[in-house]
């Protein structure tokens, strides 16, 4: 009742607020939704109100990915003057969620009934920012689908809390004037998925040469993440393994990424925090091509080495891009291919190219332009290729979001990586 009413109110042009309830348990989805909602409200001259679902999480069997993400962000030109309105909205949304969630858990346990995601957690305002209420993918022309609006400099951390963080980082040996780089390597401990989609994970120790190179360049390097299962074999006064420090907290997680000069990391949820704060990004150990492509013009990426599990045949990235859509759907586990993670040499080489591009603002090479054109054309082919008995793009639950995000993406794969792929193909 409340959820439906607030969605209706959101659609009223003259209503001064826009209300969203981001995905509470996933930091990537929540960061993306808050960022897109900020752009949506900025264009329409509305004030954004983020409602946090936090009623009895243990009893109702759910977790909160990062408390500060829902409590400590604000639009740069918006102050927190709507405390009474926020409280009332929070109260009624959480009240309805309590009864709805209790009902679902009862029937799920008693009758083994499966419920769709939209019934499990409220998604107020989400369909509207994605555009799913206006666009029918079955009838629309692919070329007329617009990319997301993305001015990624709209969100800031509450200034009062920034001062708290500035004092806190001194315990890590950091000062305000230090240039820092955030590095993240996803591992199986994050989601307990050692035996499911293990190809998304990578070994932090392969980043040691890269970290040492960055330290030599005058940066202080921070390994980001939570619940990692492996320590890095590196000790240096200018390297901080934030995974294992006692002062780790949700607010500091956001602050460190907000403070960093740039971000190096794999395709994992925390990546969207870096996007939200408009940080230059080097994507490493990529295993998904269309769903998290380098986004900004300065962003670069390096893919894992792909091979056929049975024959051992190496699969070129261009050929991988043309494989059936089931190989590009993040909801499908790929079981017949092997993704070998980037070597220390791959990571260091990519980092050097990334830094050179940032410093000299190099334009893309013809090789990079041609590959970008290839994947844009191939994605359009996926859009129109709709076999009935096979998985296809339109059956993907986030199809529209994927299309609009790919159209927004202006980055590229590393030129050094693409050159190696050409040489590999000629063998």
Image (cartoon, rainbow, N blue to C red):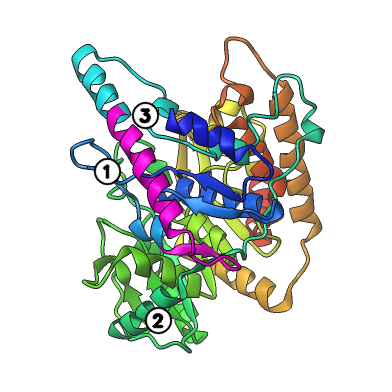
Mark whose residue sits in front, 1 or 2? 1
Q: To which residue does mark 1 refer?
A: 55
Secondary structure beneath dot 2 equals: helix
As displayed, is residue 73 above or below residue 424? below
Image point 70% across, 34% down: which residue? 379
Picture quarter containing residue 402?
Answer: top right
Q: Is residue 67 left or right of residue 112?
A: right
**Which residue is the extreme one toward the front?**
84
Which region of the structure is painted magenta?
A: 72-99
Q: Is residue 178 left or right of residue 54?
A: right
Q: CA distance from mark 3 to mark 1?
A: 14 Å
The reply to whether callout 3 and callout 1 are in contact (CB within 8 Å) is no
Q: To which residue does mark 2 refer?
A: 163
Evaluate whether residue 216 shows in this view.
Answer: yes
Q: Earlier in the sequence, mark 1 or mark 2?
A: 1
Closer to the camera, 220 or 176?
176
Q: Earlier in the sequence, mark 3 or mark 2?
A: 3
As displayed, is residue 382 above or below residue 188? above
Where's residue 90, x and y in %?
A: 38, 47
Image point 44% across, 56% down: which residue? 270
Locate the C terminus and report the quarter of the image it occupies: top right
Q: Earlier in the sequence, mark 3 or mark 1?
A: 1
Locate the N terminus and report the quarter of the image it occupies: top left
């Amino acid at each position: 009742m409340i959820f439906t009413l607030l969605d209706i109110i959101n659609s009223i042009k003259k209503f001064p607020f826009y209300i969203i309830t981001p995905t509470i348990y996933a930091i990537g989805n929540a960061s993306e939704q808050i960022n897109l909602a900020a752009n949506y409200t900025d264009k329409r001259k509305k004030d954004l109100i983020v409602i946090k679902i936090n009623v009895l999480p243990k009893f109702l069997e759910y977790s909160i990915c990062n408390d500060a993400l829902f409590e400590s962000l604000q639009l740069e030109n918006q102050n927190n003057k709507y405390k009474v309105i926020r409280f009332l909205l929070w109260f009624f949304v959480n009240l309805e969620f309590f009864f709805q969630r209790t009902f679902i858990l009862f029937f799920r346990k008693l009758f083994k009934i499966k419920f769709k995601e939209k019934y499990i957690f409220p998604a107020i305002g989400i369909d509207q920012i994605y555009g799913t209420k206006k666009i029918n993918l079955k009838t629309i022309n692919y070329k007329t689908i617009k990319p997301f609006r993305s001015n990624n400099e709209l969100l800031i951390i509450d200034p009062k809390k920034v001062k708290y963080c500035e004092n806190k980082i001194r315990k890590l040996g950091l000062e305000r004037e230090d240039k820092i780089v955030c590095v993240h390597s996803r591992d199986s401990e994050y989601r307990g998925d050692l035996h499911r989609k293990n190809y998304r994970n990578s070994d932090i120790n392969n980043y040691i040469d890269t970290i040492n190179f960055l330290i030599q360049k005058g940066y202080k390097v921070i390994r980001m993440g939570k619940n990692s299962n492996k320590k890095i074999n590196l000790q240096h006064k200018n390297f901080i393994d934030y995974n294992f420090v006692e002062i780790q907290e949700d607010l500091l997680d956001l602050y460190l990424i907000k403070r960093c000069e740039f971000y190096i990391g794999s395709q994992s949820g925390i990546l969207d925090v870096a996007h939200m704060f408009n940080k230059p990004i080097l994507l490493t150990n990529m295993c998904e091509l269309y769903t998290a492509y380098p986004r900004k013009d300065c962003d670069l990426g390096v893919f894992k080495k792909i091979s056929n599990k049975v024959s051992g045949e190496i699969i070129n990235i261009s050929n991988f891009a043309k494989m059936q859509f089931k190989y590009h759907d993040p909801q499908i586990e790929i079981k017949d291919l092997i993704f070998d993670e980037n070597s220390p040499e791959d990571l260091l080489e990519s980092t050097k190219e990334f830094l050179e591009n940032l410093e000299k603002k190099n334009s893309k090479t013809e090789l990079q332009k041609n590959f970008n054109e290839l994947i844009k054309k191939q994605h359009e082919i996926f859009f129109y290729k709709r076999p009935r008995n096979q998985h296809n793009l339109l059956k993907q639950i986030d199809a529209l979001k994927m299309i609009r995000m790919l159209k927004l993406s202006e980055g590229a794969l590393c030129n050094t990586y693409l050159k190696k792929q050409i040489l590999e193909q000629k063998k």
